[in-house]
Structures are given as structure tokens and as C-alpha cells.
Amino acid sequence: MNKKIILMFVFGMFLFSLTFVSAETSYCAERTITGLWCQNVPLSQVDQNFQSSPTSCEATKYCGLGCCYDSNEGTCMRNTPEIVCTQKQGVWQDSASCEVPQCDLGCCLIGTEAAFVPKQRCKKLSSIYGLDIIFRTDITNEVQCILSTTSDKKGACVFEEEFQTTCKFTTKKECLDLKLENVSFHEDYLCSAPELGTDCARTEKTTCVDGKDGVFFLDSCGNVANIYDASRIKDPLYWTKILDVGGSCNSAGSNADSATCGNCDYYLGSTCKSYARSTDKKRPQYGDNICRNLSCNFEGKNYQHGETWCADSKGLKNTLPGSRAFRMVCYNGEVSVEPCADFRQEVCIQSDIDGFSTAACRANRWQDCVNQEKKKDCENLDKRDCTWISGSTVQCVPNFAPGFDFWSTDEGGQAEEICSQASVTCSVTCEKGLSGSTTCESTPKGCGDEKGLNAAWEAKQNLVCGGLGDCGVKLNYMGQKGFNEIGD
Amino acid sequence: MVKEGGNKKRGQVTIFVIVGIVIVAMAILIYIFYPKISSSLGFADETPSAYIQNCIQDKVSETVQSLSLRGGELNPENYFLYKDTKIKYLCYTNEYFLTCVMQEPMLKSSFEKEVSKEIKVNVESCMNNMKDNFRKRGYVVEGGGNSFEVEFLPERIVVRFNDSLTLTKGEDIKKYDSTQVSVTNNVYDLVAIANSILNWEATYGDSETTEYMNYYHNLKVEKYKQSEGTTIYILTNRDTGEKFQFASRSIAWPPGYGGITA
């Protein structure tokens, strides 16, 4: 109990001293000598050509954070000091989270595309792309916005060119804009439809289309036809009318590496790519494009496109110095590594649903472990990440103890002070009775007897020691010894 | 005699072969270096735009690529040294546990101005060469100042010259009101995504990279948290290989039991 009180006292002292030191030396610099805006720094780092005061920036007006609105681009940037915004010709408003009318998001429908942006941004996009826009404020989230896009109906635009009846697969508007003689638009028809009598015939060629996942057939005029389906290449019906993705081959699957079906789905793990012998497992039966498999192979295990999972560096389970958690990400056939915060201040959590794993780095909640007196509170995963070690001087320790930068002057001192709290002296007093038997009493109780230290007690103390941080004599995560040895 | 004649003929054939090889080699060289040769000779580029385009497009691409790797500034004052590259902090706090303060709220326009600054000398040189070129071809050149601006647009970068240019040759008067150069590049999209990530950083101190990769199928977002609390973001267009890198320090965690300032 005494040990716990001491520990709590030490933590309290740290917080108090740091707050005190901070308040004493920190200035709110509108600009620092290194050109940073609105930072709490020592006086020596303050740029004297700008405002400063010996207080926190939160308490100043000149460094109050607001929303910087770019009236030209229609973008809103949060947490911006007024001076930074106005210097760059932005419009500053007193709302750090940009809850101002100009930044209210809506659904901007531009042609067949959609973006969930402020109104001014929508207008800007309209001027960039030269397209009419519809801005809908009734749509309140991005997913709904994207789902609300409607594409103009497409079809076969048949016309005469050089004494031949030819065709272009396009929208009705574009077709009529061609302003040619004998133009007729046939909605939902493909240019290769036999009844249209054009010179566009079916071919064995395929193509990838911008903004779409699938592999598409091409007709002899270069028009896009239906999704590549080897089994229907000679079916006149398949070359007559537009078939949607749902009605095309194997629409429930990703069709990754399929030689016969080009109904790719990015979210299921495939997309149209030009066939490459070194990458793709199968050669398409027709054409040069295939649904590229976007899954990843990592350390002999297969991960689906979009999966994220946790990985530990060596020694994380034993909280060795230098160890940390990582999140691995599989996208487009590539695995990237996202380190969680160093010094084990973040842990990686993972859940699996039907074999699809999702992981995230989140804060390691070790801070109040040592304050817990009950096992139930200690192991409450909703509140903290701690482990109960019954019978030790400090019974509740972090699952992953935080690391120290013990090599630096300041923190090194802190590490020594923290770690020393786990040091315990075991005193054993033995009395020899008249009958010749020996009775021993130890403080703390049970720590040892006339033969020496109790191994179980010693192991527990080691756990407590390691549980406080990078304490004790340890190898680092690479298996390298530290500077000190036992007995130093 | 017959033998001698045969030798002469063989010698002639050899000369013809050598001349033929030289002609083919010259043709290949002209083909390879055609734009440069033509612009130096000054007979190919009919319009000022085409001349300037040829002259500065490589410089624009190089500059944008170089600045993109540094967060939009060639020599940033506030940077994180990542793999020997100075990457600019676009959002920063020197404290622990606090969200960052936006340092570059108008990233696109700042980046555009930085590109303008870096290509200024080359643009001026190109403009002067272009004017000299037209003068050599007998034109009287009027206007065409060196004032210009750079604008990032979807899939291209436009360098727009503000002054009109008039070329006069006898009665032939050509007036160019809007000389502009367009370079294929999609840094526009990467900057827009960087802005969105920065808003996340300023609000939550972190961002979810997979959200962006779900929406933009050709985008790769890499996030590397450094020991002292900085996060390096690398945005890559998978199709073109274009990159934009920037640094942010927001809700940083101290080592061990923590301090207040870094």
C-alpha cells in the first residue's frame, strides 16, 4: 500500500512540476523564430516582430483558432490562426471546427460524378469541368451523395459517314450535338446490334474504361460494348442491348484472375488491368485485359484487398525497449506498414468478420493502472489496458508498459525515478527455537526465508518492474544488451 | 585491268554504304533531338505558346515533382527530415496531447506561388529566346512581358502569361492575348486530398488512410508515425507515380510518463 501511495505521489509531482514549469517559461508566440505560427515556446524562440505574451495561446486573441475559408477554391481549413489565414487572402471566421454556413457540406452533382463539398467548392468544380451542377443540401452524408449520381442514358448513335452507316456509343445529348444528317439515337442499344445495320461488328478485343471496374468488349468501330464474357462472345443478343453489371457474368464475385469473365469489382478485390504474364495467374481467353487480383500475399498468408491487420515488432509481448505495434494495410496488391505511436503509447486492435480482418491503432490506456485496487477494475477493458498481478506490491500494471527515452537527459532521469519505485528490499529475520527448528519472518511477507528469495515472489516483482516501463535489465527488441548489467 | 575495275567498284559501293549509314544516323539523331534542334533553329514553332511549351514544360514538371516531395516548398523552414528529404510541416504543434495548428491553410495557392518562384528564371529566359527567335525570322515583337501565374487544375498544370504579344511582319499582324502552357500533371488531386487529411489531423490528430483509398482507386496513402510525434504522409497516384509528401504533428504522445512540451 505504501508503495502505491509513493507511486501516486510521484505521478502527481510530475504533473504538477511540468504544469508549473510550463506556465513559468512558456510564451504564446504569434510566430516563432523558425517561422511557425501560434506555438507555446520559451521566450528565446519568440519572433519579436510579432505578438507574444507569457501565457498559453488558448488564452490569447491573436492566436485564437478559427476556420480559414478560401473563397476562390471553396475549401475550409480548421484550426487556423487568423493571421495565417488573412495573410494568404483567406476569410477567417471564429469557429475552429468550421461550423459556418460557407462550409456546410452538400451533395454536388457534376455530370455523372458526385462530391460531398461546400457550395462554393461545387461552383468551382463546375467552372473547372465546364459542366452544370446540382447542389443538394438534403443529402447529408458522403455515401448517400455518391449513390445519388445518375448517369445519362447511353445508347447507339447511328449516322452516315462516307456513304456508310456507322455508329458511336454515347449519350443522347452528345449524339444530337453531332449535328450530322440522318442521325438517330437508339437508347440502351449497342452499336453492334444487328438490327441497326451499322458497320460496327463484334470483335474479340477488350478494354478497360475510366471510372469503371470491369473489362469491356470492344466493337470493330472502337465502341465499348458489354462486360467481357467469353461464353457469350458469339451470342448476338449479348451484342445487341446494354446489360448492367448485376446481369453480367458472376456478378456476386470479384472474378479476379478469371480467364472468361470480366465483371471485376474493386470492393471485392479486383479491377480491370492490362494482362501481365508476371502478375496475373491466367491469360484471358479473349483480349488483353483481365480482372487483376488485388489481394496481397504477406509472409506466406493471403490477405484480401482492403484488409488491415496488426503486426508486432519483436518483443512487444514482453514490452522490450524499442518494441511497438504496427498496422498492416493491403490495397491494390501491395502491403503497406503503418506504425502505431512509438514508446507503446498506442496499441493495435483487430477484429475479424468472416475471415476479413480490420485493424486500427488506438491509445494505450495504461495511465491509471497502478491506481486500481480491485482486479475487476484493473481488468475492465472498456476503460483501461491493464493486467492484475495478485500478491505483488503493485497489483495492477499495464498490459503494454510505456517505453522511455531513457537515453535523453530529462527523460532518463524520469525513467530512473519511475523504475526505482519497483525496487523492493526483502528483509528476513530468523529465530532458532529451543527445539532446534528455525522460524523466519520476512518483510514484505513471503518474500523469502532462510534459504533466500522466494522464486515466485521474485518473478512477481520482476513483472511489476517490467510493467512500469522500460525498467530493469533487459535486452532490447533487437536482442541487444543495454548499457547496465545486473549488479551495476 | 578487270581486277582493278572490280576494286574501284567495290570501293564506290563501300563509300555509298558509309554515306548511307551516315544519312540514316543523321536522320535518327534529327528525329531524337528534333524539338530542340527545331527550336534552336527557329523554324518549327509557329506559335509563341508552342515555343514556350517546349521550352519550359520539363522545368515545370521537375519543379512540381521536387516541391511535391517537400510538402510544396523547396527549402521549408519547418520540416521533418525523412530519408534525407526536408518535408514541410503543414499542420504543427510543439506540444503533446494537443491538436495541431494549421500552418498552410491555402496549400494550393502557396504551392502554385512556390512553383512560379522556382521557374521564374527559366520562364524569363524562354520568353527572351522566343522573342529573339521571332525577331530573327523578321518579326517585330511587341508586348509579351514576363509576368505569369501558375494554376493547378485537374490532370494538368497551366502556366498563364498575363501580357499580350504582338508579332508583326509587313502586313501580317498576329496578336496573342492569352499565351498559356499546359503540362500534364495531377498534383491538383493530391493537394485536395492532403487538405482533407490535414483537416482530420487538426480535428482528431490522426486520419484513416483506407477511407481515401476506397474512394480513389488509383490512390495510395502511406502514413508513417515517427518517434517524436510527427506523422509523414505520402500520397501516390498509382497510375502515374506522382507523389505528394507532407508532415503533420498533432496529438503527439510523449515517451514514458510524459512531458508537456517536446
Image (spheres, grey):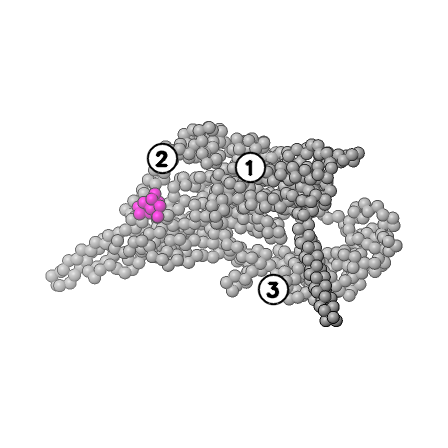
The residue sitting at the left extreme is A434
State the SS at label 3.
Answer: loop
Q: Write down the residue under mark 3.
A: A278
For badge 2, the amino acid type reads: Phe
Against A94, is B157 above or below? below
Q: Is residue A289 visible?
A: yes
**Would residue A134 be visible to someone looking at this image?**
no
Are there few (<14), some (14-19), or many (20+) residues within 10 Å of tag 1?
Answer: many
Q: Residue at x 70, y 59 (%)?
A: B19
The furthest residue to the front: B1
> Toward the viewer: B29 or A282?
B29
Disc 2 element: helix
The secondary structure type at the circle numbered 1 is loop
Residue type at tag 1 = Pro
- A166 with respect to A312 (left or right): right
**Residue A291 coordinates in the image, percent (x, y):** 65, 60
- Say what amino acid the circle numbered 3 marks: Ser
Work out whether disc 3 and disc 1 sit on a shared chain. Answer: no
Work out how far the residue at label 1 is from the one at label 2, CA to CA, in angstroms: 33 Å
Say which mark, if any, is on residue A20: 2
The span shown in magenta is: A407-418
Q: For marks 3 and 1, give the CA distance.
A: 44 Å
